[in-house]
Amino acid sequence: MMQFSCSTTRGKWNAKYELLESRSKTKHSKKNICALKIFFLSYILFVVFFIIFIYLQDYFKATFNKQIGQTHESKDSDQPNPPPSTHLPLAQTTHVHHTSTSPPSPNACGVQVKDGPVIKVDHLNTYVIGSYLDHRDREKQIKTIAIVLRHEPATYSCVMCCDGRIVTSNAQCFIHSDHFNYDYGAATITCPISSRYLTPTHVAITAGGVSWSITSFQSVRNREVPTTFPYDFTVCHSVMYDYKNVLMLVESLEMSRLLGAQRVVIYKTNCDSDTQKVLDYYEKSGFVEIIPWTIKKHIKVSKGWKIDIAPGQLQYYGQIPALNDCVFRYMYQTRYLSLQDMDEFILPIKVKTWRELFPLLEEMYGNDVGFEFENNQFPMTAKHYADHDVEAWKHVKGINILNYIERVPNNPSAFNNYKVIVNPRLVQKVTVHGLLETVNGKPTVRVNNAIARMYHFKNYTYPPNTNLITDSHLWDYTNKLKPAVSKVLQDCGLIEA
């Protein structure tokens, strides 16, 4: 009995152990199945939320772009006070990957900023140069200097960024009259601002009705009017193309400095390597600002001003839109602006500098006009004078203007060309020789050539019986000019010290 009892007891314990073990395995299996269910459920929820996130992101982008295209401005351009335009909140655009070596592109109202200066407008043959807030008009507005295909019917819209909000309005385009019958011409595109409390920081000019398609903004300059001007005199040169006359360039810039200019602006298309060394030197010093002038990448520019002699689509490398841009760019930065070429020098006769000259001119002619300076040609085909040759300069590319002191006499009864120095705040539109339109309607005045005149050095063939006039007034500046030129050439590594 005892053996049977022990066997029976052991059997019961074995059966009980097997049952417990079986139940343990069952519980373990159930736990694994539960964990798998939780994992798959979490994965499905993650995928669902990710799809919803992508959808919402695309939805808000599409809504933003659609709203930009909506404008409630009046289409009647004759209305002086357009109704309020659409105000939209700041939107977020697609993220752009940036490497650690390149800083992120600036943006305004979530749109990339480009400052050109040549930006194409949508599908139109229109190119934006620069945009400026004009404080001189009764109604606040942005004026954009542009180049347009004159015979293309086109309407424009303005998309502006104001304090993080998008504001839209219709634009007006005014083509300048001095296009010389070329297909393209300079133009001013105006953007009205419906409220005096709005100050746009950026603008995009678009084809009328397609303002939703903007891909970039341009900065609006001249947003503030300074109480004082950083410069008294600024010189605008337009435009530098295929340039390699290094010696004349340095002489021109140093003469501008001696006359009183504190800033020279050059719209540059291209130049040789030695010229670039000089430009880099002056730009680094802050005396020169270089504006890249890339219009020939878009339009076939001419090499002259008459279409029958110099064919192309735009007159003389686009110098007229460049000059207009320079006027607006420096409107509130300089007291006076001189619009001249690199080979032209406006010299006072009885005083040495423009600072001494202009109080006299304003006393004689008034301070609300521009000043014309008569062109006098000094042909480089005339006699060569070696009085101020510098041995070290002989291997520098270019012409020494000090070698030419004979000028062609002007006919006092005929029209003689000129260049101007003007208060830029008087100017609405400028052309090569003078002003097309002023704020007060007053024309420029011709300065008596006994007070000041322009010296123009060029390759010019004059009639063989011409009695040239010896005029060595430029030599009055040689004591300061020659050492200044030599220093620049040495600093640029173009001559030995």
Image: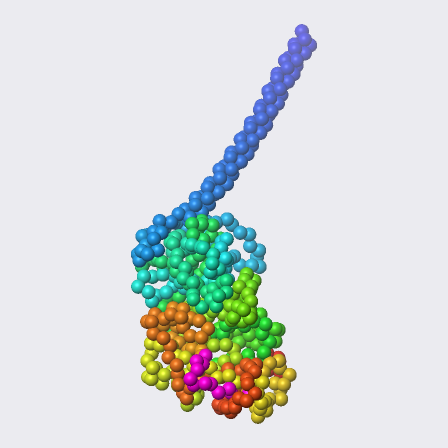
125 up-or-down from 365: above or below: above
Q: Quadrant of residue 222?
A: bottom left
Q: Quadrant of residue 99?
A: bottom right
In the image, 100 versus 321, the foreground residue is 321
Q: Is residue 375 visible?
A: yes
Q: What range of the chain is rendered magenta?
A: 404-417
In the image, 67 versus 490, the foreground residue is 67
7 up-or-down from 483: above or below: above
Left or right, residue 426 beside residue 37: left
In the image, farthest residue toward the top: 1
Image point (51%, 35%), residue name: 48
In the image, 409 versus 253, the foreground residue is 409
Image quarter hosting the C terminus: bottom right
Left or right, residue 64 beside residue 441: right
Q: Horizontal and vertical percent for residue 275? A: 59, 75
Image point (38%, 77%), residue name: 444
Image point (33%, 84%), residue name: 364
14 up-or-down from 164: above or below: above
Q: Horizontal and vertical percent for residue 359? A: 36, 83
By secondary structure, the bulk of the magenta-drawn segment is best described as loop
Image quarter hosting the N terminus: top right
Q: Horizontal and vertical percent for residue 205? A: 44, 56
Image point (55%, 34%), residue name: 43
Left or right, residue 310 beside residue 64: right
In the rendered image, residue 55 lying in the magenta stretch gets the answer: no
Query: Disc count in the image?
Result: 0
91 up-or-down from 189: above or below: above
